[in-house]
Image (cartoon, coloured by chain):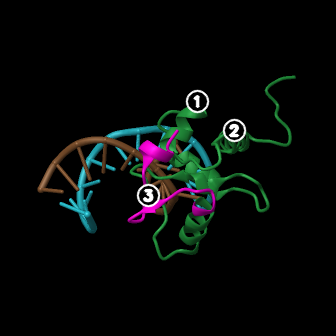
Chain colours: A green, B brown, C cyan
Amino acid sequence: MRGKRSTSSRTEQAFRHIWQTVKTIPRGRVAAYGEVAQMAGMPRRARLVGTALRNLPDGSRVPWHRVIAAGGKPAFPPDSRAYREQRKKLEAEGVVFINGRIDFSRYGL
DNA sequence: GTCTTGACTAAGC
DNA sequence: GGCTTAGCCAAGA
């Protein structure tokens, strides 16, 4: 086998690795993009995590809502649909929003 | 191969 | 406390 990778490019595998890492976030907890990147063994690739989640295939069971920006706030504008969905899912898991922000010392990893 | 874009982050004002 | 700037690094055009 030479480096020939059929059916999945290098980036696709990186995305899957990120998705798999996100799946390890326990229910009722949250992690920052940078944290996920580090857990996936890609320090300083926070933006890549965002790209991966954006490319997330429809119907996947990846808990993308547990990934938030550093500072404990969602990476979406508060008036966006994604924001409401994320907040709804998190609150359903017991995560409390305080002034639109999540307490990392309490719900972080 | 270069340039722009982005579900990031930390520091500065 | 909120907006701006700069640094970051890979994907997409």
Please state the horizontal and vertical placement of residue A71, each as a whole percent of the image.
39, 51
Residue type beneath disc 3: Lys
Q: Which residue is mark 2?
A: A17
User: Which is closer to the viewer, label 3 or label 1?
Assistant: 3
Q: Secondary structure at mark 1?
A: loop
Residue type beneath disc 2: His
- Left/right of residue A84 with respect to residue A59 in the rendered view: left
Q: Which residue is mark 3?
A: A73
Local packing at callout 3 (Cα closer than 10 Å; few below 14, some 14-19, many 20+) is: many
Residue type beneath disc 1: Gly
Q: Nearer the viewer, residue A94 or A72?
A: A94
Residues under numbered marks 2 and 1 in contact, where contact means CB atoms less than 8 Å apart? yes
Q: Which residue is mark 1?
A: A41
- Left/right of residue B9 with respect to residue A6 in the rendered view: left
Residues under numbered marks 3 and 2 in contact, where contact means CB atoms less than 8 Å apart? no
Q: Earlier in the sequence, mark 3 or mark 1?
A: 1
Based on the picture, tell me whether residue A107 belongs to the magenta stretch: yes
Q: CA distance from mark 2 to mark 1?
A: 9 Å
Check the picture and name the quadrant holding the N terminus of chain A: top right
